Image (cartoon, rainbow, N blue to C red):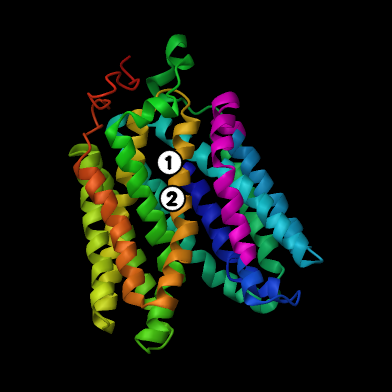
Amino acid sequence: MLSAVAFSVAVGFGVVAPAIPVFAREFGVGRTAAGAVISAFAFMRLVSALASGRLVDRVGERVVLASGIAIVAVSSALAGLAQSYTQLVLLRGVGGIGSAMFTVSAVSLLLRVVSADQRGRATGMWQAGFLLGGIAGPALGGVLTEISVRAPFFVYAGTLAVAGSIGMLFLTHTPLHDKEVAASTALQRTTLREALRVSGYRAALVTNLGNGWALFGVRSSLVPLFVTERLGTSPTWIGVGFFVSAAAQGALLLPAGRLADTVGRRPAMIAGSAVATASLLVLTLFESLPLYVLAMALFGAGAAFLSVGPSATVGDVVVGRGGTVVAAFQMSSDVGAVAGPLVAGYLADGYSFGAAFGVTAAVVAAGLVASLLSRETRHRPQADPEPETTAAPTPST
Protein backbone atom coordinates (compact mmCIF):
# COMPACT_ATOMS: atom_id res chain seq x y z
CA MET A 1 0.00 0.00 0.00
CA LEU A 2 2.83 2.40 0.73
CA SER A 3 4.29 1.61 -2.70
CA ALA A 4 0.90 2.44 -4.26
CA VAL A 5 0.86 5.72 -2.32
CA ALA A 6 4.38 6.47 -3.55
CA PHE A 7 3.34 5.79 -7.16
CA SER A 8 0.32 8.10 -6.91
CA VAL A 9 2.38 10.90 -5.37
CA ALA A 10 5.19 10.53 -7.92
CA VAL A 11 2.80 10.52 -10.88
CA GLY A 12 1.26 13.77 -9.67
CA PHE A 13 4.62 15.39 -9.03
CA GLY A 14 5.79 14.35 -12.48
CA VAL A 15 2.64 15.84 -14.00
CA VAL A 16 3.08 19.22 -12.34
CA ALA A 17 6.87 19.54 -12.66
CA PRO A 18 6.96 20.66 -16.34
CA ALA A 19 4.22 23.23 -15.72
CA ILE A 20 5.74 25.04 -12.73
CA PRO A 21 8.35 27.22 -14.50
CA VAL A 22 6.03 27.82 -17.47
CA PHE A 23 3.22 28.95 -15.16
CA ALA A 24 5.58 31.20 -13.21
CA ARG A 25 6.77 32.89 -16.41
CA GLU A 26 3.19 33.84 -17.22
CA PHE A 27 3.34 36.31 -14.33
CA GLY A 28 6.10 38.19 -16.18
CA VAL A 29 9.07 37.06 -14.08
CA GLY A 30 12.52 35.99 -15.29
CA ARG A 31 14.04 32.53 -15.40
CA THR A 32 15.72 32.91 -12.02
CA ALA A 33 12.41 33.82 -10.37
CA ALA A 34 10.72 30.92 -12.15
CA GLY A 35 13.35 28.59 -10.74
CA ALA A 36 12.75 30.06 -7.29
CA VAL A 37 9.28 28.49 -7.30
CA ILE A 38 10.93 25.07 -7.41
CA SER A 39 13.52 26.09 -4.85
CA ALA A 40 10.81 27.31 -2.44
CA PHE A 41 9.29 23.81 -2.38
CA ALA A 42 12.68 22.16 -1.80
CA PHE A 43 13.78 24.71 0.82
CA MET A 44 10.62 24.41 2.92
CA ARG A 45 10.79 20.64 2.65
CA LEU A 46 14.33 20.79 4.02
CA VAL A 47 13.74 23.17 6.92
CA SER A 48 10.53 21.46 8.06
CA ALA A 49 11.82 17.87 7.98
CA LEU A 50 13.07 17.78 11.58
CA ALA A 51 9.82 19.27 12.90
CA SER A 52 7.94 16.64 10.89
CA GLY A 53 10.02 13.95 12.58
CA ARG A 54 9.18 15.31 16.02
CA LEU A 55 5.50 15.34 15.03
CA VAL A 56 5.75 11.68 14.02
CA ASP A 57 7.22 10.91 17.44
CA ARG A 58 4.29 12.65 19.12
CA VAL A 59 1.19 11.59 17.16
CA GLY A 60 2.30 8.69 14.96
CA GLU A 61 3.09 8.05 11.33
CA ARG A 62 -0.41 7.55 9.95
CA VAL A 63 -1.79 10.89 11.15
CA VAL A 64 1.23 12.81 9.87
CA LEU A 65 1.18 10.96 6.54
CA ALA A 66 -2.47 11.74 5.87
CA SER A 67 -2.09 15.35 7.03
CA GLY A 68 1.00 15.89 4.87
CA ILE A 69 -0.72 14.56 1.75
CA ALA A 70 -3.76 16.73 2.46
CA ILE A 71 -1.58 19.85 2.82
CA VAL A 72 0.16 19.21 -0.51
CA ALA A 73 -3.15 18.44 -2.24
CA VAL A 74 -4.93 21.60 -1.03
CA SER A 75 -1.92 23.86 -1.63
CA SER A 76 -1.50 22.44 -5.16
CA ALA A 77 -5.14 23.03 -6.04
CA LEU A 78 -4.88 26.59 -4.72
CA ALA A 79 -1.63 27.09 -6.65
CA GLY A 80 -3.54 26.26 -9.81
CA LEU A 81 -5.83 29.19 -8.95
CA ALA A 82 -2.97 31.59 -8.07
CA GLN A 83 -3.43 35.13 -9.38
CA SER A 84 0.10 36.36 -8.73
CA TYR A 85 3.68 35.15 -8.61
CA THR A 86 3.84 35.73 -4.86
CA GLN A 87 0.82 33.52 -4.27
CA LEU A 88 2.38 30.77 -6.36
CA VAL A 89 5.67 30.86 -4.44
CA LEU A 90 3.96 30.86 -1.04
CA LEU A 91 1.64 27.99 -1.94
CA ARG A 92 4.50 25.88 -3.29
CA GLY A 93 6.38 26.57 -0.07
CA VAL A 94 3.41 25.30 1.95
CA GLY A 95 3.41 22.24 -0.30
CA GLY A 96 7.04 21.62 0.63
CA ILE A 97 6.06 21.43 4.30
CA GLY A 98 3.39 18.85 3.51
CA SER A 99 5.86 16.90 1.38
CA ALA A 100 8.31 16.71 4.28
CA MET A 101 5.54 15.44 6.57
CA PHE A 102 4.54 12.79 4.04
CA THR A 103 8.05 11.56 3.27
CA VAL A 104 9.30 11.35 6.86
CA SER A 105 6.15 9.61 8.12
CA ALA A 106 5.96 7.20 5.17
CA VAL A 107 9.60 6.10 5.47
CA SER A 108 9.26 5.76 9.24
CA LEU A 109 6.13 3.63 8.81
CA LEU A 110 7.73 1.52 6.08
CA LEU A 111 10.70 0.71 8.27
CA ARG A 112 8.40 -0.39 11.11
CA VAL A 113 5.88 -2.58 9.29
CA VAL A 114 8.43 -5.07 7.94
CA SER A 115 10.83 -7.39 9.68
CA ALA A 116 14.58 -6.80 9.47
CA ASP A 117 15.13 -9.61 6.97
CA GLN A 118 12.70 -7.98 4.49
CA ARG A 119 13.61 -4.34 5.01
CA GLY A 120 15.86 -3.98 1.96
CA ARG A 121 13.35 -5.52 -0.45
CA ALA A 122 10.49 -3.50 1.03
CA THR A 123 12.49 -0.31 0.53
CA GLY A 124 13.19 -1.42 -3.04
CA MET A 125 9.46 -1.80 -3.74
CA TRP A 126 8.78 1.61 -2.20
CA GLN A 127 11.45 3.22 -4.38
CA ALA A 128 10.10 1.37 -7.42
CA GLY A 129 6.72 3.00 -6.85
CA PHE A 130 8.35 6.43 -6.94
CA LEU A 131 10.45 5.50 -9.97
CA LEU A 132 7.53 4.24 -12.06
CA GLY A 133 5.41 7.24 -11.12
CA GLY A 134 8.26 9.57 -11.93
CA ILE A 135 8.56 8.04 -15.41
CA ALA A 136 4.83 8.11 -16.16
CA GLY A 137 4.05 11.58 -14.79
CA PRO A 138 6.11 13.93 -16.98
CA ALA A 139 4.71 12.52 -20.24
CA LEU A 140 1.16 13.32 -19.11
CA GLY A 141 2.30 16.63 -17.63
CA GLY A 142 3.71 17.83 -20.92
CA VAL A 143 0.41 17.16 -22.70
CA LEU A 144 -1.63 18.88 -19.99
CA THR A 145 0.68 21.91 -19.99
CA GLU A 146 0.01 22.33 -23.71
CA ILE A 147 -3.72 22.50 -22.90
CA SER A 148 -3.46 24.71 -19.81
CA VAL A 149 -0.60 25.56 -17.47
CA ARG A 150 -3.06 25.43 -14.57
CA ALA A 151 -4.49 21.99 -15.35
CA PRO A 152 -1.50 19.96 -14.02
CA PHE A 153 -1.92 21.47 -10.55
CA PHE A 154 -5.49 20.18 -10.34
CA VAL A 155 -4.47 16.76 -11.63
CA TYR A 156 -1.70 16.70 -9.02
CA ALA A 157 -4.25 17.47 -6.31
CA GLY A 158 -6.36 14.60 -7.66
CA THR A 159 -3.53 12.05 -7.58
CA LEU A 160 -2.73 13.15 -4.04
CA ALA A 161 -6.37 12.60 -3.09
CA VAL A 162 -6.00 9.05 -4.42
CA ALA A 163 -2.81 8.59 -2.41
CA GLY A 164 -4.45 9.93 0.74
CA SER A 165 -7.45 7.66 0.26
CA ILE A 166 -5.21 4.61 -0.09
CA GLY A 167 -3.43 5.60 3.10
CA MET A 168 -6.62 6.19 5.08
CA LEU A 169 -8.40 3.03 3.89
CA PHE A 170 -5.64 0.45 3.94
CA LEU A 171 -3.04 1.64 6.44
CA THR A 172 -5.28 2.42 9.40
CA HIS A 173 -4.93 -0.99 11.03
CA THR A 174 -1.53 -2.02 9.70
CA PRO A 175 0.35 -3.93 12.42
CA LEU A 176 3.71 -2.44 13.30
CA HIS A 177 5.51 -5.81 13.47
CA ASP A 178 6.93 -6.93 16.81
CA LYS A 179 8.52 -3.65 17.85
CA GLU A 180 5.36 -2.58 19.66
CA VAL A 181 4.01 -5.89 20.90
CA ALA A 182 4.97 -5.08 24.45
CA ALA A 183 3.93 -1.80 26.00
CA SER A 184 7.42 -1.17 27.25
CA THR A 185 8.83 -1.54 23.76
CA ALA A 186 6.14 0.74 22.37
CA LEU A 187 7.40 3.52 24.61
CA GLN A 188 11.02 3.18 23.46
CA ARG A 189 12.28 5.64 20.92
CA THR A 190 15.70 5.97 19.36
CA THR A 191 16.98 9.51 19.72
CA LEU A 192 19.10 11.19 17.07
CA ARG A 193 22.04 11.32 19.47
CA GLU A 194 21.84 7.55 20.00
CA ALA A 195 21.60 6.91 16.28
CA LEU A 196 24.64 9.07 15.55
CA ARG A 197 26.72 6.78 17.77
CA VAL A 198 26.23 4.01 15.21
CA SER A 199 28.81 4.14 12.43
CA GLY A 200 26.38 2.52 9.99
CA TYR A 201 23.88 5.33 10.50
CA ARG A 202 26.57 7.96 9.98
CA ALA A 203 27.57 6.20 6.76
CA ALA A 204 23.91 6.19 5.69
CA LEU A 205 23.75 9.96 6.19
CA VAL A 206 26.85 10.55 4.07
CA THR A 207 25.75 8.21 1.27
CA ASN A 208 22.29 9.78 1.24
CA LEU A 209 23.88 13.22 0.97
CA GLY A 210 25.78 12.06 -2.10
CA ASN A 211 22.69 10.40 -3.53
CA GLY A 212 20.67 13.60 -3.18
CA TRP A 213 23.52 15.72 -4.54
CA ALA A 214 24.01 13.57 -7.64
CA LEU A 215 20.66 11.88 -8.29
CA PHE A 216 18.17 14.59 -7.37
CA GLY A 217 20.42 17.57 -7.97
CA VAL A 218 23.20 17.39 -10.53
CA ARG A 219 21.61 14.76 -12.77
CA SER A 220 18.50 16.89 -13.28
CA SER A 221 20.17 20.30 -13.48
CA LEU A 222 23.54 19.73 -15.20
CA VAL A 223 23.33 16.58 -17.32
CA PRO A 224 20.81 18.08 -19.80
CA LEU A 225 23.10 21.08 -20.34
CA PHE A 226 26.12 18.79 -20.71
CA VAL A 227 24.36 16.82 -23.45
CA THR A 228 23.18 19.80 -25.47
CA GLU A 229 25.97 22.33 -24.89
CA ARG A 230 29.12 20.25 -24.42
CA LEU A 231 28.37 17.14 -26.45
CA GLY A 232 26.46 19.24 -28.98
CA THR A 233 23.79 16.62 -29.55
CA SER A 234 20.01 16.66 -29.83
CA PRO A 235 17.91 17.04 -26.66
CA THR A 236 16.53 13.61 -27.55
CA TRP A 237 19.68 12.13 -26.05
CA ILE A 238 18.78 13.68 -22.71
CA GLY A 239 15.68 11.50 -22.67
CA VAL A 240 17.67 8.48 -23.85
CA GLY A 241 20.17 8.86 -21.04
CA PHE A 242 17.49 9.36 -18.40
CA PHE A 243 15.54 6.38 -19.70
CA VAL A 244 18.62 4.13 -19.60
CA SER A 245 19.37 5.31 -16.08
CA ALA A 246 15.81 4.71 -14.88
CA ALA A 247 15.69 1.30 -16.56
CA ALA A 248 18.94 0.20 -14.88
CA GLN A 249 17.75 1.47 -11.52
CA GLY A 250 14.35 -0.17 -11.84
CA ALA A 251 15.82 -3.51 -12.91
CA LEU A 252 18.21 -3.62 -9.95
CA LEU A 253 16.07 -2.24 -7.11
CA LEU A 254 14.72 -5.58 -5.94
CA PRO A 255 18.03 -7.48 -6.42
CA ALA A 256 19.73 -4.68 -4.48
CA GLY A 257 17.15 -5.06 -1.72
CA ARG A 258 17.73 -8.82 -1.66
CA LEU A 259 21.48 -8.24 -1.33
CA ALA A 260 20.92 -5.81 1.54
CA ASP A 261 18.68 -8.35 3.31
CA THR A 262 20.86 -11.43 2.81
CA VAL A 263 24.44 -10.18 2.64
CA GLY A 264 24.20 -6.88 4.48
CA ARG A 265 23.47 -3.17 4.31
CA ARG A 266 27.16 -2.24 4.26
CA PRO A 267 27.96 -4.19 1.04
CA ALA A 268 24.95 -2.56 -0.65
CA MET A 269 26.16 0.93 0.29
CA ILE A 270 29.72 0.13 -0.78
CA ALA A 271 28.58 -1.27 -4.13
CA GLY A 272 26.23 1.63 -4.82
CA SER A 273 28.75 4.31 -3.90
CA ALA A 274 31.53 2.66 -5.91
CA VAL A 275 29.45 2.26 -9.08
CA ALA A 276 27.94 5.76 -8.84
CA THR A 277 31.40 7.27 -8.30
CA ALA A 278 32.72 5.40 -11.34
CA SER A 279 29.84 6.70 -13.47
CA LEU A 280 30.59 10.30 -12.50
CA LEU A 281 34.29 9.84 -13.19
CA VAL A 282 33.38 8.72 -16.71
CA LEU A 283 31.48 11.98 -17.21
CA THR A 284 34.40 13.90 -15.68
CA LEU A 285 37.09 12.43 -17.92
CA PHE A 286 35.35 11.79 -21.22
CA GLU A 287 33.19 13.84 -23.57
CA SER A 288 31.70 11.08 -25.69
CA LEU A 289 28.08 10.26 -26.47
CA PRO A 290 28.46 6.46 -26.08
CA LEU A 291 30.30 6.91 -22.79
CA TYR A 292 27.61 9.34 -21.63
CA VAL A 293 24.99 6.62 -22.16
CA LEU A 294 27.23 4.11 -20.37
CA ALA A 295 27.73 6.53 -17.47
CA MET A 296 23.97 7.01 -17.12
CA ALA A 297 23.43 3.24 -17.04
CA LEU A 298 26.11 2.87 -14.37
CA PHE A 299 24.63 5.73 -12.39
CA GLY A 300 21.19 4.09 -12.43
CA ALA A 301 22.73 0.83 -11.22
CA GLY A 302 24.52 2.59 -8.38
CA ALA A 303 21.40 4.54 -7.47
CA ALA A 304 19.48 1.27 -7.02
CA PHE A 305 21.84 0.13 -4.27
CA LEU A 306 21.96 3.60 -2.73
CA SER A 307 18.16 3.64 -2.60
CA VAL A 308 17.92 0.55 -0.38
CA GLY A 309 21.14 0.12 1.63
CA PRO A 310 21.10 3.39 3.59
CA SER A 311 17.33 3.25 4.23
CA ALA A 312 17.53 -0.32 5.52
CA THR A 313 20.38 0.75 7.80
CA VAL A 314 18.19 3.46 9.31
CA GLY A 315 15.50 0.85 9.93
CA ASP A 316 18.02 -1.33 11.77
CA VAL A 317 18.93 1.54 14.08
CA VAL A 318 15.42 2.79 14.87
CA VAL A 319 13.33 1.33 17.68
CA GLY A 320 9.72 2.46 18.04
CA ARG A 321 8.90 5.84 16.53
CA GLY A 322 12.12 7.20 15.13
CA GLY A 323 10.77 10.30 13.48
CA THR A 324 13.76 12.54 14.17
CA VAL A 325 16.21 9.83 13.10
CA VAL A 326 14.37 9.35 9.80
CA ALA A 327 14.00 13.12 9.39
CA ALA A 328 17.74 13.70 9.72
CA PHE A 329 18.32 10.97 7.15
CA GLN A 330 15.87 12.63 4.75
CA MET A 331 17.43 16.04 5.37
CA SER A 332 20.84 14.75 4.30
CA SER A 333 19.42 13.99 0.85
CA ASP A 334 17.58 17.31 0.69
CA VAL A 335 20.76 19.22 1.55
CA GLY A 336 22.47 17.51 -1.35
CA ALA A 337 19.56 18.21 -3.69
CA VAL A 338 19.64 21.91 -2.81
CA ALA A 339 23.43 22.42 -2.72
CA GLY A 340 24.37 20.12 -5.60
CA PRO A 341 22.86 22.13 -8.47
CA LEU A 342 24.18 25.41 -7.06
CA VAL A 343 27.76 24.19 -6.61
CA ALA A 344 27.80 22.23 -9.85
CA GLY A 345 26.32 25.15 -11.80
CA TYR A 346 28.92 27.53 -10.39
CA LEU A 347 31.76 25.17 -11.30
CA ALA A 348 30.37 24.54 -14.79
CA ASP A 349 30.07 28.29 -15.44
CA GLY A 350 33.42 29.25 -13.92
CA TYR A 351 35.53 26.25 -14.86
CA SER A 352 34.12 23.29 -16.79
CA PHE A 353 31.57 20.51 -16.79
CA GLY A 354 34.41 18.17 -15.86
CA ALA A 355 35.09 20.14 -12.68
CA ALA A 356 31.41 20.03 -11.73
CA PHE A 357 31.15 16.28 -12.28
CA GLY A 358 34.49 15.73 -10.52
CA VAL A 359 33.34 17.47 -7.34
CA THR A 360 30.09 15.51 -7.48
CA ALA A 361 32.11 12.29 -7.77
CA ALA A 362 34.09 13.34 -4.68
CA VAL A 363 30.88 13.89 -2.68
CA VAL A 364 29.58 10.44 -3.67
CA ALA A 365 33.00 8.90 -2.95
CA ALA A 366 32.79 10.28 0.60
CA GLY A 367 29.88 7.89 1.10
CA LEU A 368 32.06 5.04 -0.15
CA VAL A 369 34.75 5.89 2.41
CA ALA A 370 32.21 6.21 5.23
CA SER A 371 30.66 2.86 4.27
CA LEU A 372 34.04 1.12 4.20
CA LEU A 373 34.76 2.45 7.70
CA SER A 374 31.34 1.51 9.10
CA ARG A 375 30.10 -1.63 10.82
CA GLU A 376 27.28 -3.85 9.60
CA THR A 377 23.85 -3.13 11.17
CA ARG A 378 21.75 -5.95 9.69
CA HIS A 379 21.83 -8.06 12.85
CA ARG A 380 22.64 -5.61 15.61
CA PRO A 381 23.60 -1.93 15.24
CA GLN A 382 26.43 -1.01 17.56
CA ALA A 383 27.97 2.24 18.64
CA ASP A 384 31.64 3.00 18.16
CA PRO A 385 33.58 1.47 21.05
CA GLU A 386 35.52 4.67 21.79
CA PRO A 387 34.92 7.22 23.10
CA GLU A 388 31.23 6.37 23.33
CA THR A 389 30.52 2.85 24.52
CA THR A 390 26.74 2.84 24.84
CA ALA A 391 25.08 1.01 21.96
CA ALA A 392 21.97 2.41 20.34
CA PRO A 393 18.74 0.66 21.32
CA THR A 394 17.91 -2.39 19.23
CA PRO A 395 14.72 -4.41 18.80
CA SER A 396 16.13 -6.97 21.25
CA THR A 397 16.57 -4.52 24.15
Query: Is there CB contact under 8 Å for labels 1 and 2?
Result: yes
Against 87, is 51 above or below? above
Q: Position of residue 293 (x, y in %)?
A: 28, 76
Q: Residue at x 44, y 17 (%)?
A: 188
Quadrant hosting residue 383: top left
Q: Position of residue 11 (x, y in %)?
A: 54, 59
Give amino acid for label 1.
Answer: Phe
- Region of the chain picked out in magenta, as a range: 36-63
Q: Judging from the image, what secondary structure is the residue with disc 1 in?
A: helix
The quadrant the C terminus occupies is top left
Mark 1 to mark 2 CA distance (whole Å): 7 Å
Q: Which residue is mark 1?
A: 329
Against 84, is 52 above or below? above
Q: Residue furthest right?
A: 83
Give me the disc on residue 333.
2
Q: Residue at x 65, y 39 (%)?
A: 67
Give amino acid for label 2.
Answer: Ser
Q: Is residue 231 visible?
A: yes
Q: Is residue 59 left or right of residue 322?
A: right
Q: Position of residue 255 (x, y in %)?
A: 24, 50
